[in-house]
Amino acid sequence: MVAEGPQPPPQSALPDASQPPRPPLLDALTDVAGVRVGHAQVAGAGALSGTTVVLAPEGGAVAAVDVRGGGPGTRETDALDPRNLVQRVDAIVLTGGSAFGLDAASGVVAWLEEQGRGVRVGAGPTQVVPVVPAAALFDLGRGGDWRARPDASTGRAAVEAAAASEPGTPVAEGSVGAGTGAVAGQLKGGIGTASVRLGSGVTVAALVAVNAAGSVLDPRTGVLFGEYGAGEPPAYPAAGTHAAALRRLAREQEAMAAAGGGVPPFNTTIAVVATDADLVRAQAQKLAGTAHDGMARAVRPVHLLTDGDTVFALATGRVRVDSGNPVAVNEILAAGADVLARAIVKAVRAARSTEGPGGAFLAYTDLYGDRPDDRDPHGDRPDGKDPHKDRADGGGEA
């Protein structure tokens, strides 16, 4: 049994003059044709949480998952095992609210049932069972109210926002959706997204809610870990700017500890990596696994007992890939790690500082700035060392 809806025939990944040119990339998950994204936030005083829904094209998409964190909060992940029945899914939910927030998926299930989308179990148009995998991050109490967390209505609002969006719509980043109350180490976390189109014509993209127990910031330099090894050399903050940022972070940490607060050591970074390649389920699962390497580049340490780090993979199957050619699949796997690392950087850069009863969570750009004249124009590390020589002292995988 598969999700309802016609499956479009895969296009060749080889250049074809007969195929219409595709639009330029938005650097977002929605660059994978047919994939849409919706965000919703929990309303009310003391609320700092939300939900993000990734809506697959009509007919669903091949899906897989890889869970590496020691404290995951998930739903329907066993259904994605390649040995099991469900072949395609129609949506994936990323949500705040820890285990309570997984209720947001119920709202998505109800909406999909109304649309007749899901695993068909009878002859009637609505006799379907939508399978909606979900993962939650810990943000309880960060707005001040421990009970202000996503529920079914939040999930419905997010999926309705996704459905109402036009294909190829830019995706809001920063403190939105599942990233509303996210924290990355000592910095404000959030939603980030990135994409790439390979020479073969395959598109690979990622969307992430960054809420890591580990740090995204190199304490020696002020550079975000995910910027090391990227296409362009990192621009190092001026030494004075970095020193001032560390002092301010230390003061905030001391103030929160003195008030009896502070961020509980429960986190989780959750992500979706999508491609338009026609991957089989086992290949999609491999994509979810290798994408974790991008998380490990950008967060140090990663995959701890107090993290629930989870990556979902979606493959819409619109572009044909030679499954017998390992090189063709390898470049998709490598791209998944690259776009996830870059999405984490974008999430941290897009986040904005938040202060309330639950504490003060400072944004990277408020500490370091985001204009070229705020940073060292020479690209030299403040301590004069080569960052690549001591790169191995973190807790990530590669």
Image (cartoon, rainbow, N blue to C red):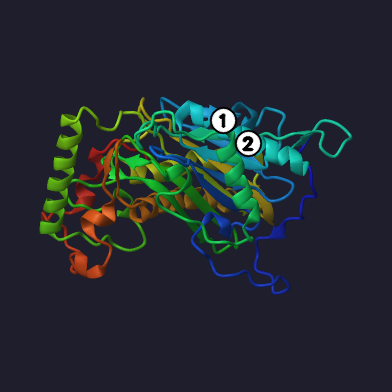
In the foreground, 24 or 134: 134
* Residue 304: image location, x then y, percent: 35, 29
Q: Amino acid at mark 2?
A: Gly
Q: Is residue 83 visible?
A: yes
Q: Is 48 positioned to the left or the right of 383 in the image?
A: right
> Which quadrant of the figure has residue 114?
top right
* Residue 72: image location, x then y, percent: 46, 27
27 w.r.t. 360: above or below:
below
| Identity of the residue drawn at 63% across and 36% down | 107
According to the image, label 1 marks what residue?
103
Q: Is 363 positioned to the left or the right of 330 in the image?
A: left
Farthest residue toward the front?
45
In the picture, which quadrant includes the C terminus? top left
According to the image, label 2 marks what residue?
107
* Residue 225: image location, x then y, percent: 29, 49
Pointer 1 with pointer 2, Cβ within 8 A: yes
Q: Secondary structure under badge 1?
A: loop
| Identity of the residue drawn at 53% across and 48% down | 39
Q: Is 203 positioned to the left or the right of 217 in the image?
A: right
Using a 10 Å C-alpha cutoff, classify the residue at mark 2 as few (fewer than 14 neighbours), some (14 to 19) or many (20 or more). Answer: many
Q: Amino acid at mark 1?
A: Asp
